[in-house]
Amino acid sequence: MKHFINLKDIKTEDLKKILRDAKKRKSKRKNLNTLDIDKGAPLNGKILIQMFEKPSLRTRLSFYLAIRQLGGGTITLRSNELHLGKGGETLADTAKILSTYGDGFMLRTDSDKKINEFVKHIKIPLINGLSPSSHPTQILSDIFTIEEIKKKPISKLNICWIGDSNNVLNSLIVASVKFSFDLSVACPKNYKPKKFIMDWLKENKRNIKIFHNPKNAVKNADVIFSDKVISLNDKVDVKKKIKDFKKFYIDSNLIKSAPKSIFLHCLPRGGEVSEKVFLGKKSHVWQQARNRVHVQKSILMYCFGKLR
């Protein structure tokens, strides 16, 4: 049994195995319908329990299709239907019940503490579908998309992030260590990556470049990443934050400074990117979203000990 909680806890070779498996699985589905089962139904009889404390579209749908295409099934729970440490049932007891009824548990949560508590007591694989500090399934899928489009290892590419220092960027920073790629981050001075992730980066003897001018950041970029500046549960002064990020707007003029780049966005989008860029020829956001199904399947195979 293996968990998938944070990229930093997973061996690079295992991450690469997941990507290789996803590539094979995608190629074999070209003539199959959406709910057709993969040859051999490798997860036949398995059930994945999903629970969402935060809104989800791509993560919810991709894991649903992933387990179904592997021959298993899924059930989705709403957090307000469970005690989750409230109303007399501890997280430890909840974890034991989940272990009794399910074969795997995917949690999208507003608390890193809940993930840490669950992992102490759960007896089935735990997958982090998003937490405040990390979004590992998103970034691994994004690496798959980048290598698919650029047709070369990400280690040979220059990656640029423009926007807020959030959980997605945290996982991208970890990935820059695991996969040895150059990463530039463009953000306002007061929105730099958190100390805990920068300390981890230093411990692993790696560095990233931080810019406060996006035009300088995108020079030589092969990939330009972004994310919504105002997240759904952002407890901030929205007007001030929008003002702070005004110079980091991704438009055609900025993209022209990186002529060989592609544009990716983990979605949902906000006002951080122009319509022309988002729907333009350099944008691959829909391919990026579709690929999550293939990578989630291989993550499940890894967690269930079926990855070869």
Image (tube, rainbow, N blue to C red):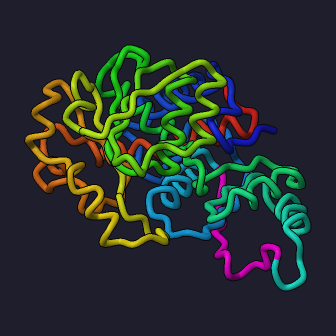
Left or right? Give the position of 154 relative to 278: right
Residue drawn at point x = 58 percent, y = 55 percent = 130
**Residue 120 visible from this viewpoint:** yes
Q: Nearer the viewer, residue 31 or 77?
A: 77
Residue drawn at point x = 56 percent, y = 53 percent = 63
User: How far across and how far down the image is residue 229, in percent?
Assistant: 35, 58
Q: Classify the position of the C terminus by image quarter.
A: top right
User: How far across and how far down the image is residue 203, in percent?
Assistant: 66, 24
Q: Is residue 155 magenta?
A: no
Q: Classify the position of the N terminus by image quarter.
A: top right
User: How far across and how far down the image is residue 289, in percent?
Assistant: 37, 48
Q: Nearer the viewer, residue 196 or 1?
A: 196
Left or right? Give the position of 297 relative to 181: right
Residue drawn at point x = 26 percent, y = 63 percent = 243
User: How far across and how far down the image is residue 183, in percent?
Assistant: 40, 27
Residue range in magenta is: 72-85
